[in-house]
Amino acid sequence: MEYLAAIDHIMGMTDYEKPNTTPGTRARYDLQRIGAFLEALGNPHIGVPTAHIAGTKGKGSTAAMVTSVLDVAGYKPGLFTSPHLHTFRERIRVGDELIPEEGFGRIVEDLWPTKKEIEVDYGRVTVFELLTAMAFCYFRSWGIGSQVIEVGLGGRLDSTNLVEPLACGITSLGLDHTEVLGDTLEKIAWEKAGIIKPGVPVISSPQKPEALGVLQAVSRKQGSQLTLAGTDILWEGETANLDGQAFWLSTPKNNYRLQIPLLGKYQLENAAVAVGIVEALREGGLEISKDAVEEGLRRVEWPCRLEVLSKNPLILTDGAHNPHSAGRLVEAIQELFPGKRILLIIGVSGNKDLGGLIGELNRLSAAEVIVTRSRHTRAAEPERIAGLFGLEKDDIHITDAVSEALDIGLDMALDGDLVLITGSLFVAAEAREHVKDIAPELYTPKGGAG
């Protein structure tokens, strides 16, 4: 199957994870269907040393760090993440190599008959379930030596939660996807803690007391050792600039001097969780040297997370899409660029807590605000976002294209200004495409393929 034909098949499926699903057809949230699907495929997710990572903020960055270390250590790691920035192929990779177009098309073609058979008894397979199964089958075909699996949504009922991990990670928790996961931090923590398996070590970011209490209770019940970054794993920043940051990190077993090409103090927290996961994998039998840890973190790449797209003019993009991540972004900007005049470009998905997110971003006191929208069907109307900023009509700029918003911001920017693009990963990705001249992967759902 050609790659674009495979994408058409996927986009023609009913995507139950979108809020505009036809009433009465929403998929049930359990693991029976994906379990049956994977069993029919020979359980490709089993038998490989696995790290499983959930969280609200930072789980992708943490997964990328663990993968980079495993790659340097020679374990040929598979990495499954979501969503993607520029191409579906980013979601499935071995080391830093994306699944090739030919491989993507072949796996869709191979899995499609099994998908149809499963749907007879279990209902329609979701897009994420198909991509999960595709990832495991691709990893099996590669003969990978390890895999790092990022949870898509929640944890307990996420389709990735059939893996048998050597280590679990839970990054910073906050309120997001409350319509599915619950409207309190305790409920969200309970869903995320659903990835904790009996006897499997858990490494967690620092958490608010109400979330930490849940993680501690679930870990005790499962007989799993909980290692907490900020308590059991400590770090201290050394230097930071536009090229990254250097820091010291200590665990109960080792001391490290590390460098990462990622900005923001919160990435040091993510690195602490990543190193904790790596050490747990080592305890589980993998041979990972201290040098591999240091070199792996030095090499890590994870775009659109406080990414510098240009130094002159200074353009940063970040996929902060909820109040929790926006708050972290604001703290990083205030620390890295105190006193800088900021031109804020924002676009948000319509199912987010717009008021809470904008409330956090308003702390930047941006000199200019440009509101836009991504190409995504869930993008909120710019006029709706603009109204929440509480600015006079003449003090806010509205456009329907990220590229136009960026051009407006650059036209208004003075020497030394910071142009910041945020609000969703979709907006951040489109800004990156515009600055770096990356061709977007455009496709139009044709329907009926599911």
Image: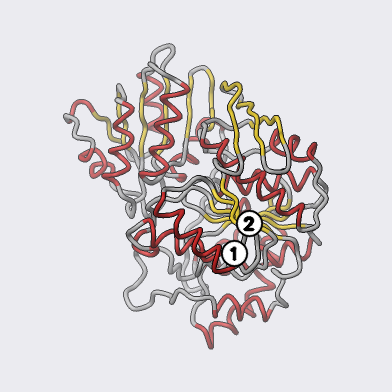
Which one is in front, 205 or 92?
205
Q: Quadrant of residue 423?
A: top left
Whether residue 433 is visible here, answered yes or no, is no
Q: Position of residue 369 (x, y in %)?
A: 30, 29
Query: Which numbered disc, 2 or 1, marks the residue that appears first in the sequence?
Result: 2
Q: Quadrant of residue 333?
A: top left
Residue 247 lies, with reference to residue 377, above or below; the image says: above
Q: Position of residue 320 (x, y in %)?
A: 43, 41
Q: How is this picture coloured?
A: secondary structure
Q: Position of residue 20 (x, y in %)?
A: 34, 65
Q: Quadrant of residue 256?
A: top right
- At mark 1, the secondary structure is helix
Residue 445 in the figure: left or right of residue 244? left
Amino acid on which the number 1 mark rests in the picture? Leu
Residue 432 in the figure: left or right of residue 38? left
Amino acid on which the number 2 mark rests in the picture? Phe
Residue 172 in the figure: left or right of residue 261? left
Mark 1: give few (<14), some (14-19) or many (20+) Cα within 10 Å: many
Which residue was labeled with disc 2?
80
The N terminus - image quarter: bottom right
- At mark 2, the secondary structure is strand
Which residue was labeled with disc 1?
131
* Furthest-left residue in this view: 392
Q: Residue at x 43, y 75 (%)?
A: 27
Whether residue 109 is visible here, answered yes or no, is yes
